[in-house]
Image (cartoon, helix red, strand yellow):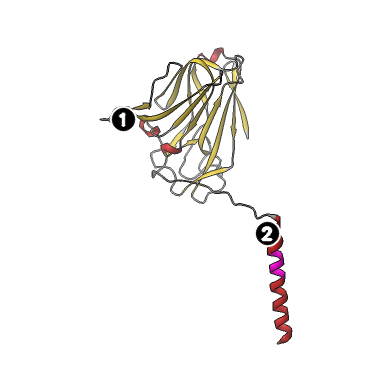
Amino acid sequence: MAFLSPVHAATVEVSYDLELAYHSEHGIRSNTATAIRDFVGMDILATYTDGTTEVWDWVYTNPYSIWEAGTDHISNDLTIDVINGRFAINAVKSLASLAFDLVGANAIWDVGDYVDSDPRNSPTTKVGHEFRVRSGNSDALEGEIRASYSDRVQIGDHLTGEDAFTHLLVDFTGLADGGFTGDMTWSSDTDSLAFAGDLAPVVPAVPLPAGGLLLLTGLGALGLKRRAGKSAAA
């Protein structure tokens, strides 16, 4: 699925990969508001337009406080902060994309603004929202920003939820300059799990090869023939 929304001179295209990747038995904690410390364990991958990459882990930055957190190192090319629940970036080097993985943070991207009664709304997630540019020099941008959510999470036995994901890729290569430099503040609703370690990978069912199906069919037919023979003998 994909949706387009205006962002000043540029546009944002949001898409979702609905293939299941994780399962949460207990879902989201009752206080769905996330603080800067709730992102500890998040992995961030930056890819620059020159092909180089950089990786950050979100960690506690003060050993004496659980309230201070941020990236595990300072980069000369890109800074990333979370301020009042919004992500703030400053790219000195031309940025092609940013990828955020919340599995290690025991959290999800809650992208659906669906009411609780909507089957697309996963239980306990409440109302969320997808990627939105809030401020910065984006008003001077031309082209398109693509935000792609993947690694969908099933909560409990609710199969129709379309709002819980662990992975977000923000792609800037559709902009007129082929990348992004400057300041930008953006948001996408996030929720923390009720219990740490409650995300279990979903193992897809492996289809039986054609030969295996023929073997099962043959064994089934043989069983029926044997039962028919026994009935005739009786």
Q: Position of residue 44 (x, y in %)?
A: 46, 29
Q: Report helix, strand or loop for mark 1.
A: loop
Instruction: Place residue 20 in its image quadrant.
Output: top right
Q: Position of residue 145 (x, y in %)?
A: 58, 22
Q: Report helix, strand or loop for mark 2.
A: helix
Pick the residue in front: 146 or 10: 146
Q: Which amino acid type is marked by label 1? A: Trp
- Residue plotted at (72% across, 79% down): 228
Q: Position of residue 40 (x, y in %)?
A: 38, 33
Query: Label 1, on which residue?
Result: 67
Over which residues does the magenta segment extend? Answer: 216-221
Q: Which amino acid type is marked by label 2? A: Gly
Is residue 147 found left or right of 60 in the rendered image?
Answer: right
Q: Is residue 52 magenta?
A: no
N-terminal-most mark, 1 or 2 = 1
Q: Residue furthest left?
A: 64
Q: Position of residue 183 (x, y in %)?
A: 47, 15
